[in-house]
Amino acid sequence: MPDGDCVGSQLALAHALRALGKEVTLALDDKIPESLFFLDGVRAIAPHTPRAQDVFVFVDGSDPSRYGKAFDAAAIGARPIILIDHHITNEPFGTYNLVDPGAASAAEIVYAVVRALDVPISPALAQALLTGIVTDTLGFRTAATTPETLESATALVRHGGSIPEIIDQVYNRRSFQTLHVLGYALAHAALVGKIIYSALDFQTLEKFGANGNGTNGIVNQLLTVADADIAFFLVEKKDGRIDLSMRARVGTDVSGAARRLGGGGHKQASGATLSPPFETAVQRVLDAIQQESLP
Ligand SMILES: [Mn+2]
């Protein structure tokens, strides 16, 4: 489930490396949300297993399983892996690991790399990085947003990045089907103690004619309820597996619950992929939160 930080960071790194005359292949195993199609070069990213590369760079995913078929240990062999990430649950699986859980986005770390490479920062590169920063901080609204985050964003705007374009493309252009799915999810939300949740089975998703990408922001909407400290949202995929997204208010931590369920992430935003059946998924998540995230 690639997001704006994942896609923006890898595009920006590609722009920088190409400016140095390097050949770059961009791989992503999952569909890219249409809301990110405005980024320059995004259509060259494809779900393939890169072969015969000199160096493999993995960005914005905390463990090899997050990369699907794009992480192929046999294809990589003994060649170097560079890992650039900001997840607190990170397993440093690279030969070189540039991991900073204090960074609000992987894009901020990539921006430091780009500056160190001393390449010209084109508007396209700036917009890719700014998209990572703006989306991972939900528009500079998360607790992870630091003065450094804002300074990076300021510099990227000076290099030609546009925050209004990102907000318009990513947040204000959803499909009519997506709006209906949001309506369904909100209408079927349940509040249990301090936990609010909703779930969407594949049949319902198909009935609305929406693809899985339209459910990205729903979990954030759930956590707007004052009585809730934790929100989670479940979506059943076509193959029966279930995507879990979790959010927590500051002072609460969902990364342990995500890890317990085979996933990972940040204190305030984590996720996992659950195995079937869908019917028991809500209870499995509630149990994990009870064991890991509540006092
Ligand atoms: Mn990220």
Image: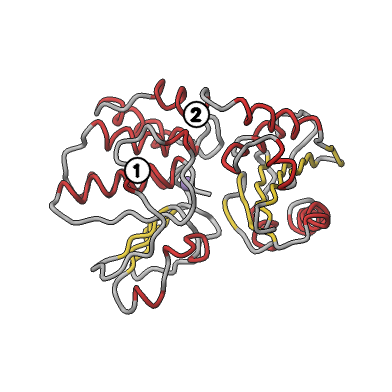
Nearest-to-viewer mark from 1 and 2: 1
Residue at the right extreme, as displayed: 192
What's the residue at 61%, 35% (across, down)? 217
Mark 1 vs ligand 1: CB below 8 Å:
no
- What residue is disc 2 on? 139
- What residue is disc 1 on? 43
Crowding at dot 2, Cα within 10 Å, few <14 / some 14-19 / many 20+, comes out as some
Q: Is residue 107 above or below residue 163?
A: below
Q: Position of residue 77 (x, y in %)?
A: 34, 78
Q: Position of residue 154 (x, y in %)?
A: 33, 27
What's the residue at 67%, 51% (across, down)? 244
Residue type at numbered disc 2: Gly
**Residue 119 lies in what quarter of the image?**
top left
Q: Is residue 73 left or right of residue 12?
A: right
Residue type at numbered disc 1: Arg
Q: Is residue 112 above or below residue 78?
A: above
Tag 1's secondary structure?
helix
Display colour scheme: secondary structure
Crowding at dot 1, Cα within 10 Å, few <14 / some 14-19 / many 20+, comes out as few
